Amino acid sequence: MIRATFIKHILRFISPAGTSRGVLAEKDSWFVKLTDPVDPSITGIGECSILPGLSYDYSGDFESRLESVCRMISRGELPVDAPLPDHPSIRFGLETALRDLRTGGKRLLFSTPFTDGRAGIPTNGLIWMGTKQSMLDQIAEKIEQGFRVIKMKVGALRFEDELEILHSVRGRFDRSDLEIRLDANGAWKPGEALDRLHRLEDFGIHSVEQPIRQGNVAEMSRLCEASPVDIALDEELIGISALRSKRELLESVGPDYIVLKPGLLGGFAFAEEWIGLARELGIGWWITSALESNIGLNAVAQWTASLQITLPQGLGTGHLFFNNIPAPLEMRRDQLWYNPEGHWDLSRII
């Protein structure tokens, strides 16, 4: 019988991470460990990464609920691959750990040119909210590093200041040289969103993620129909597990893109349902990590590499935290690579 345990790990940011929802200095993660019943030396590891105010299963008793799930699995009372629709982050951690266990506990979850070290995954450079100058400095740094797609968090500064930043960037780089994605994290009010989208039209913006807070489905539908800038749904997808409900949302809102965070959506199987619907309805998509450690990032990256991707992804760089888990993930210019000769240091969690 598979034995399930976990360990908590507090990730500490090198620099505070600013979004319209606040500034993060640290975040909690829990590493789920599944031990092979025949060979206890083989352990599969997955990550349950929680974002306060965003994760569907975030609550003060999260750890006790995770403990209960692990206890039931160890007793044979709950299948490791149970859907757990009310616990998407736990489902993601267990799904990753089970796949790792079944492939020998080597953190090689999918066999692709990415895990062979023969192909990288194109990704965008993330620009955190801050002062106007700090954001300009971040953009300059990302461009110097070789990124040709940047994703800029908006919604915390005055909108006029954010327009000035965009004006400065477009003064140096046109759309053919640099793609700009914006992420409002639901910060704009429904009554102001369309005007702001019209004012962004001249800057050649690729898309705006979640311009208004999730749950305003009728208003979001109107925005998607009237906006001169493409709109992507992100937080709007969180908490929806039934396939029928997923279809109803996409058909009623009609977004141009959806942004998929497996750690917040319940894992790869649930995220693949969204992808299947998006392809059927002619909606674009890309995948984004959700501030996981390298355990979660590795899982998301390997899964992403197994899909037929057409756009730059939103995968992390692995360099956000002081105390990340050392892993064979590398950024080379604007692509994330897996080095098969690299080393995993799991001493902090095993």
Image: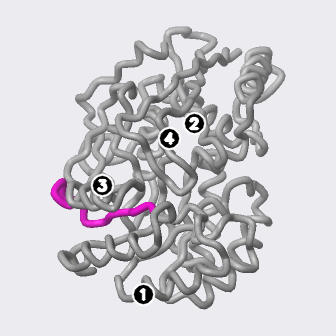
Q: Amino acid at mark 2?
A: Ser
* Rendered residue at 30%/55% (across/down): 134
Question: Residue at the right extreme?
Answer: 77
Q: Which quadrant does the N terminus fall into?
A: top right
| Numbered mark located on residue 49 in the image | 2
Marks 2/3 in contact by CB < 8 Å: the verdict is no
Instruction: Give residue 228's position: percent from left, percent from top.
Output: 50, 89
The type of residue carrying mark 3 is Ser
Amino acid at the residue labelled 1: Glu
First in sequence: mark 2 or mark 3? Answer: 2
Q: Nearer the viewer, mark 4 or mark 1?
A: 4
Q: Quadrant of residue 167?
A: bottom left
Q: Which residues lie in the magenta part?
A: 143-153
**Which numbered tag is attached to residue 24?**
4
Q: CA distance from mark 1 to mark 2?
A: 35 Å
- Real-space Cα separation, disc 2 to disc 3, in angstroms: 27 Å
The Cα–Cα distance between marks 4 and 2, rounded to whole angstroms, is 14 Å
Q: Is residue 71 left or right of residue 14?
A: right
